Image (cartoon, rainbow, N blue to C red):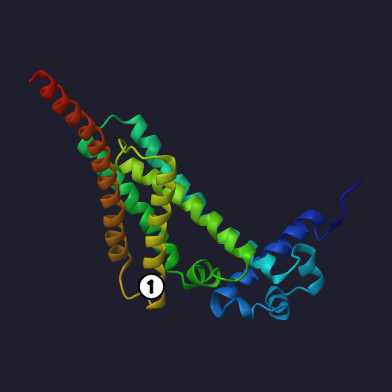
Amino acid sequence: MEKRIYAGLDLTTRKAERKIRFIEAGIKIIGTNGYRSATLRALCSEAGLTERYFYESFSSTEALFLAVLDHLTLDFKTRLRALIQSHTNQQNSQPQSKIQNIADQTDLARLALRLYFTEVQNPVFARITLIEVLGMSPTVDQKYIENTREFSILVTQIIRAIEPNIRIEPQDEDIVGTALVGSVITAATGWMLQGYPYSIEQMVNNCLKILTGTARQLISSAVQDIAIPVAANAIIKQANAT
């Protein structure tokens, strides 16, 4: 069966274009005035399309909100993963001293934080991903949890880059990663709600202390976990010898 062509575009392409127009309308309206302002009439007016076309792509305004959230976070996650992969490839291809390696990996954490706070400095992105996403519905809450978990995995990758010798149980790593993401999100939310009183560099530098401090604490704990049994064995051997 031949595709129907209209204005040089087939039906599938036209549907995709209409969907992205509604997503862009949602970003503008929700990011500026909040989710409650994203009525069907307002969305259709902003997109320049009719209700029929809205329901062609979305079952409800909540479904649109989820699409808006995916659109914003996917773009950021893609760039963050690319940043991590680029640094990983660079480290693997160029032999470096331990001091230089630590400096470069700390730079990775700094770049990742700068990327995030640059996004948050856009009040539309910040309002949607930090404020409007909270408490909307169980479905949106679940999406928020999933996004947080994904970001926690990326953050623990950065922590392991700073201190590759970290020893931590998988369930503990999940808790630590979630806690770190939570601290950065809380800092970002306060920054936005206060009207961005600090520079991006101030936000980056202070959140970097949290990441590097955690990395050092984890490596310290790993060393301690090894040292204590060794010391205990030495004491036992000494006691047996006497």
The quarter in which the C terminus is drawn is top left
Give 213 or 204, whichever is nearer the viewer: 213
Q: Residue at x 41, y 77 (%)?
A: 193
Residue plotted at (30% across, 35% down)? 165
Examine the rendering and report whether any part of residue 68 can be seen.
no
* SS for callout 1: helix
Please identify the residue farthest to the top as the structure is shown. Answer: 241
**Neighbourhood count class around disc 1 (C-alpha, 10 Å): few under 14, some 14–19, many 20 upward:** few
Towards the viewer: 10 or 69: 69
Amino acid type at image mark 1: Gly
Q: Is residue 94 above or below residue 73?
A: above
- Residue with the most extreme right position: 1
Q: Is residue 54 visible?
A: yes
- In the rendering, at what x and y percent does residue 23 appear? 65, 66
Q: Quadrant of residue 196?
A: bottom left
Q: In the displayed structure, does residue 192 sit left or right of residue 21?
A: left
Q: Is residue 41 left or right of residue 1?
A: left
Residue 210: x and y in percent read 29, 56
Find disc 1 in the rendering and name its residue: 190
Question: Quarter-wise, where is residue 237 in the image?
Answer: top left
Residue 18, how many percent across, how many down?
73, 64
